[in-house]
Image (cartoon, grey):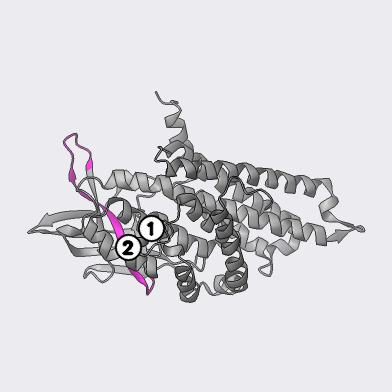
Amino acid sequence: MSINRNLSEEQVFLRDSVRRFAEEVIKPQAKDLDEKEEFSYEITAQMAEMGFLGAFLPEKYGGSGLDYLSYIIIVEEIARVDSSQAATIAAHNSLGTGPIYDYGSDEQKENYLPQLAGGKLWGFGLTEPEAGSDAGNTKTRAYQEQGEWTINGAKIFITNASTDITLGSTVLAVTGQQPDGRKEFTSFIVENSNPGMECRQMKGKMMWRSSNTSELYFSDCKVPNESILGKRGDGFKQMLATLDKGRLSIAAMGLGLAQGAFEAALHYAKQRKTFGRAISTYQSNAFKLADIDMGIELARNYLYEVCRMAARGEKITKESAIAKLYCSELAHKAADHCVQIHGGYGLMKEYDAERFYRDQKLLEIGEGTSEIQRLVISRIIGCFD
């Protein structure tokens, strides 16, 4: 990586440090963890020690106090080697600690954030079996009675929600009806130890096999009124704002995976020879590599600028959708070219190309499908006015 793209000395040092960690600690274990579909408590603990779990939290909560771009660089560099470990960091920061830091009371922040920066994990309970992209169709409900709330419903595909070090999840529930007839949504902080809450790990995944993915079930799960995150009725607004930033971390995962796939493909193409010459010298392969390198350059420049916009407090709904859409589809293209250049070897688990190909697919689905990103963009540019 020859251009530092207006990064500070601290950001360049951070990038290089994370890359060394990913190469020396994560990469040697990635294939084995993927094969066993095993969440690594050891790697997660090491990432916590390096400050990754509290990347942008202030130091008073035990965080690293990094700017948002620095956090995105962490995710990018880890995804370059292993999307599963990057998913643990991305979901924990953007979707786990982020809403508590942005909307939590002083008491909630003081209680949870130091633990979450120090090695505990937190989930983000939005998606349901019948409400993914259509979050307005949420079926989970909560009703208030004598100073406490009772939650009933289910969530699915929740990252980090059922490990032995998970404290709990932020859960979106319908709590009534607004004056205009629309549903009222409220976010609740629910600990895994709450009676009536059951967490089940999901197995048999195609991708991110060593990250934790869970189903959550709520059966008359009672939480105190103090468990409301922010204000009653603000849940949907909180979730949308959280997803705006969360999409940047998915974009970073796409960018990092594309970088890793490009490097793997280029290395193989320069080593592999047919008819007495390296296959990188064949125009069909050289053009594939050139296209991916061009895409990476454009993606990195755009994503970093959107992160700077977010740091300035600017609205980034359209920009985050563009970044997520472009980077996730770039990852798809890079992984596809990586496998194609590897030929038959790209289909074998011995090579990283096969894992890159599987891992990239979720990036076009999670935190808003590619179709939803196009819908967001088209609405903002006025297509439906």
Q: Is residue 125 left or right of residue 74?
A: left
Q: Which of marks 2 and 1 is nearer the N terminus?
A: 1
Residue bearing the label numbered 2: 113
Q: In this view, does 361 lie to the left or right of 135?
A: right
Mark 2: give few (<14), some (14-19) or many (20+) Cα within 10 Å.
Answer: many
Residue bearing the label numbered 1: 57
The quarter holding residue 360 reads: bottom right
Quadrant location of the C terminus in the rendered image? top left
Mark 1: give few (<14), some (14-19) or many (20+) Cα within 10 Å.
Answer: many
Q: Say if 49 sits above or below 319 in the image.
A: below
Measuring from the top left, give residue 190's x and y in whole percent: 26, 63
Q: In this view, does 278 lie to the left or right of 58?
A: right
The amino acid beneath tag 2 is Leu
Residue 313 in view in this figure:
yes
Residue 371 in view in this figure:
no
Q: Say if 307 sits above or below 115 in the image.
A: above
Mark 2 → mark 1, Cα distance in angstroms? 8 Å
Residue 75 badge: none
Measuring from the top left, give residue 368's x and y in whole percent: 44, 46
Q: Say if 290 sits above or below 18 in the image.
A: above
The quarter holding residue 155 reads: bottom left
User: In this orientation, which residue lies closer to the viewer: 298 or 312?
Assistant: 312
For the view shown, which residue lies furthest in the right direction?
Answer: 276
The amino acid beneath tag 1 is Leu
Query: Going 57% across and 49% down the picture, which residue do you hit?
Result: 7
Q: Is residue 269 magenta?
A: no
Query: Going 73% across and 49% down the picture, which residue do you hit?
Result: 289
Magenta range: 161-183
Measuring from the top left, give residue 165's x and y in whole percent: 37, 73
User: In this orientation, which residue lies closer to the viewer: 104 or 311?
Assistant: 311
Q: Say if 25 sits above or below 281 in the image.
A: below
Q: Do the residues under discs 2 and 1 have CB atoms within 8 angstroms?
A: yes
